[in-house]
Image (tube, rainbow, N blue to C red):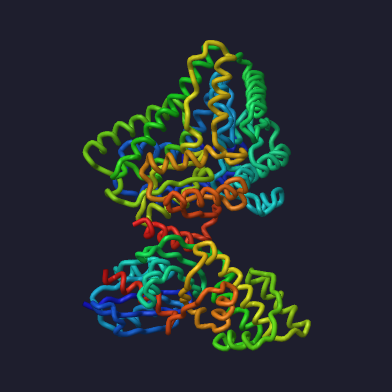
């Protein structure tokens, strides 16, 4: 690791020893899980590079942006509209929450039975190992599940730049009015932070940028309909994960380059995985970097993942924002319309999610669904039971998994997943 | 051709060899011990076969060490139970460190299964630790429990908590057989929950080491009001299933 990065990290107040340990684990996991895969698209080299520099070059870029006066905003949720951030000449980044870190410290502030994702976000702060968090000029929390909204009360004591956005739980007119009011308030807060007033031109440009990024992911998703699968689920998940970190225009270009390559593969009947491999849709909780636990078990057990019904996946990237509005107000309305469709399990009822799961099973020709629930994530675990029942009534096999970021249940999970794959064969 | 199935469990290893007709030619059993691959090698050296299929928690290690194919315990037990009891639609397997309920389609394929997650609650390991706490031999544990006039309620599912609960019951001077019966009932509650999530009626084939425990089968039959079928040697079912899958 270059000296330049080390001084950058200490400048951000990171704990260098802890951070070295984290990067070491990350590097080994990436080697074992990603680089050991066969028949990867050439274009994945870009993502390999991004991952190798995820705390290095990308952070340097963000710090250079800050140097030139641009603000960095960190978020933990797909409800934070990137369009508004970009339109005010700021950059939005996802904050680290995909690995256990400093758990003894975390459990002084959060009950043990808190989901791994929330605990992880605290662990990265308390362990001083997330350069994104430390680079951020504003950290956006959002009132989604009970765990997160109460955790932000404690996070507020750890950081001095937390902004909490309220969110509705019902898709009613009142719910829409609330999210709209909150997005308008957020726009004001971002403008105040950056000193930049959002104009119709800047907002339109931002909507186009984010739409392009989402369209690239939509294109990638649709190519996963092919059999043989042209790309592994692990690699496609990585693209969905990097969505939250990378420079938007460069991300769009890189995903489209992979798609060009995959189209060629499909026309030549080439695949990353042999034809007729059992195809699985993952549905449920988000899988943040470096949480590759479930897909690595699935894809080393003789199946391929063809879609993620998840915030890091199709739930997060579904639907474009209408870019035809000419006024800021009209475009803000379009943004509200787009985000209000996100079928997060904090909403009640949330029937659209079940419809989407079934649509995805059909579109990606999945043989079965693995419902991925993080232990103690009440909203998704609650939904997993009716989801399983509804899928089984349609003759779609479903396996419900409840797990966390630890490795202690790997053996049991492997047996269950292998048996599920046998069941599909 | 001779087909072997080896089931490498947490406590024991079973080996079954079948012929082309699927008839059992020989069966062997050994303790898993601390070096499962060494124990497995001793068993396979004693028999001759053309193909071998491994199952059980040690299957992946066996696959690497002996270049064999593998199948999960779930499919192996389903296949083995179906061979012994044609028409089987529900299988309950309780082994040393896990327990599972399996529902089968009419054609014998696995339809749905439930399995305990990471902890030992509701498994043979739980019963073994509790037998030891109460000073019973594991072989006698079920018979002793059956002799109790009533069962004492044990509320903890967790092995660690249940052990302290048992210790305090002993200290209170409670009857040892009644405590034993209560412990069996607690494992049964968990098994019944799993079975009911996969099927609601019909006979149940009970496999794995815990099926040898007479109190378990008696309580299960009573609680579910469904007929319980137990193979002559319930511990061999996984290995038999693996051998039959190797034959296919």
State the image coordinates of residue A320 (x, y, percent, origin top left): 47, 25
User: Is B50 located above or below residue B101 in the figure?
Assistant: below
Residue B125 in the image: x percent, y percent?
A: 55, 75
In the rendered image, residue A82, in percent from the top left (x then y), is placed at 54, 26
Q: Is residue B204 above or below residue A345?
A: below
Q: Decide which of A308, B150 is in the foreground and name it.
A: B150
Q: Give the number of marks.
A: 0
Q: Is residue A404 left or right of residue B229?
A: right
Query: Where's the N terminus of chain B, which quadrant?
Result: bottom left
Rendered residue at 30%/38% (across/down): A42
Asked if one can make out residue B149 in the rendered structure from this viewpoint, the answer is yes
On the image, which quarter does residue A256 sit in?
Answer: top left
Q: Along the line of sight, which residue is nearer the eye, A330 or B36? A: A330
Check the picture and name the quadrant holding the C terminus of chain B. Answer: bottom left
Q: Please give the name of the residue rendered at 35% of the width and 75% of the height, measured from the top-left corner.
A: B83
Residue depicted at 54% across the width and 54% down the height: A402
Q: Is residue B58 visible?
A: no
Q: Residue at x 33, y 75 (%)?
A: B5
Q: Is residue B247 left or right of residue A105?
A: left
Image position, residue A18 (x, y; %): 58, 48
What residue occupies the far right of the structure in this picture? Answer: B172
Residue A411 vertical position relative to residue A88 in the rendered view, above or below: below
């Amino acid at each position: 690791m270059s000296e330049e990065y080390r001084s950058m990290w200490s400048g951000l107040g990171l704990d260098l020893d802890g951070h070295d340990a984290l990067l070491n684990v990350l590097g080994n996991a990436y080697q074992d899980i990603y680089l050991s895969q066969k028949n990867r698209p050439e274009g994945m080299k870009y993502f390999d590079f991004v991952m190798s520099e995820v705390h290095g070059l990308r952070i340097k870029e963000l710090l250079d942006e800050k140097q030139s006066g641009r603000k960095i905003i960190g978020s933990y949720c797909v409800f934070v509209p990137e369009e508004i951030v970009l339109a005010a000449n700021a950059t939005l980044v996802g904050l680290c929450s995909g690995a256990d870190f400093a758990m003894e410290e975390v459990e002084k502030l959060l009950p043990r039975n808190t989901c791994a994702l929330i605990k992880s976000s605290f662990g990265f702060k308390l362990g001083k190992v997330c350069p994104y968090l430390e680079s951020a000029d504003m950290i956006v929390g959002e009132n989604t599940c009970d765990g997160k909204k109460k955790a932000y009360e404690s996070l507020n004591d750890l950081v001095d730049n937390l902004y909490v956005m309220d969110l509705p739980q019902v898709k009613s007119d009142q719910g829409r009015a609330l999210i709209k009011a909150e997005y308008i308030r957020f726009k004001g807060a971002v403008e105040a932070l950056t000193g930049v007033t959002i104009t119709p031109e800047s907002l339109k440009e931002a909507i186009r940028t984010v739409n392009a990024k989402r369209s690239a992911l939509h294109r990638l998703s649709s190519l996963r309909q092919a059999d043989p699968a042209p790309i592994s689920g692990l690699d496609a998940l990585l693209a969905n994960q990097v969505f939250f970190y990378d420079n938007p225009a460069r991300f769009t270009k890189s995903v489209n380059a992979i798609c060009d390559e995959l189209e060629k593969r499909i026309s030549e009947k080439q695949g990353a995985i042999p034809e007729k491999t059992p195809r699985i849709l993952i549905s449920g909780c988000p899988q943040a970097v470096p949480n590759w636990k479930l897909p690595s078990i699935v894809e080393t057990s003789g199946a391929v993942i063809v879609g993620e019904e998840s915030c890091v996946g199709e739930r997060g990237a579904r639907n474009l924002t209408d870019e035809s509005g000419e006024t800021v107000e009209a475009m803000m309305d379009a943004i509200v319309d787009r985000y209000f469709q996100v079928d997060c399990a904090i909403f009640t009822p949330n029937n659209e999610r079940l419809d989407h799961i079934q649509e995805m099973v059909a579109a990606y020709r999945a043989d079965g669904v693995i419902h991925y629930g993080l232990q103690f994530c009440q909203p998704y675990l609650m939904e997993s039971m009716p989801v399983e029942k509804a899928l089984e009534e349609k003759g779609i096999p479903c396996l419900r998994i409840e797990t966390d970021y630890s490795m202690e249940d790997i053996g049991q999970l492997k047996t269950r997943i292998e048996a599920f794959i046998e069941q599909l064969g | 051709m001779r087909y072997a199935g080896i089931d490498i469990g947490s406590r024991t290893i079973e080996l079954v060899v079948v012929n082309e007709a699927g008839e059992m030619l020989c069966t062997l059993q050994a303790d898993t011990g601390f070096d499962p691959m060494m124990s497995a090698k001793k068993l396979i050296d004693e028999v001759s076969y053309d193909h071998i299929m491994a199952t059980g928690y040690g299957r992946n290690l066996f696959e690497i060490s002996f270049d064999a194919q593998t199948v999960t315990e779930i499919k192996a037990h389903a296949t083995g139970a179906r061979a012994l009891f044609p028409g089987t639609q529900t299988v309950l397997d309780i082994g040393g460190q896990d327990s599972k309920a399996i529902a089968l389609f009419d054609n014998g394929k696995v339809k749905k299964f439930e399995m305990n997650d990471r902890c030992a609650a509701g498994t043979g390991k739980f019963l073994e630790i509790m037998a030891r706490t109460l000073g019973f031999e594991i072989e006698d544990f079920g018979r002793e429990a059956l002799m109790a006039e009533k069962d004492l309620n044990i509320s903890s599912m967790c092995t660690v908590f249940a052990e302290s609960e048992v210790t305090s019951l002993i200290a209170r001077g409670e009857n040892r057989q009644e405590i034993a019966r209560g412990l069996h009932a607690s494992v049964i509650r968990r098994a019944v929950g799993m079975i009911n999530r996969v099927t609601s009626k019909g006979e149940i084939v009970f496999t794995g080491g815990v099926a040898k425990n007479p109190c378990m089968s008696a309580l299960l039959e009573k609680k579910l009001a469904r007929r319980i079928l137990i193979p002559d040697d319930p511990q061999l079912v996984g290995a038999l299933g693996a051998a039959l899958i190797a034959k296919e």
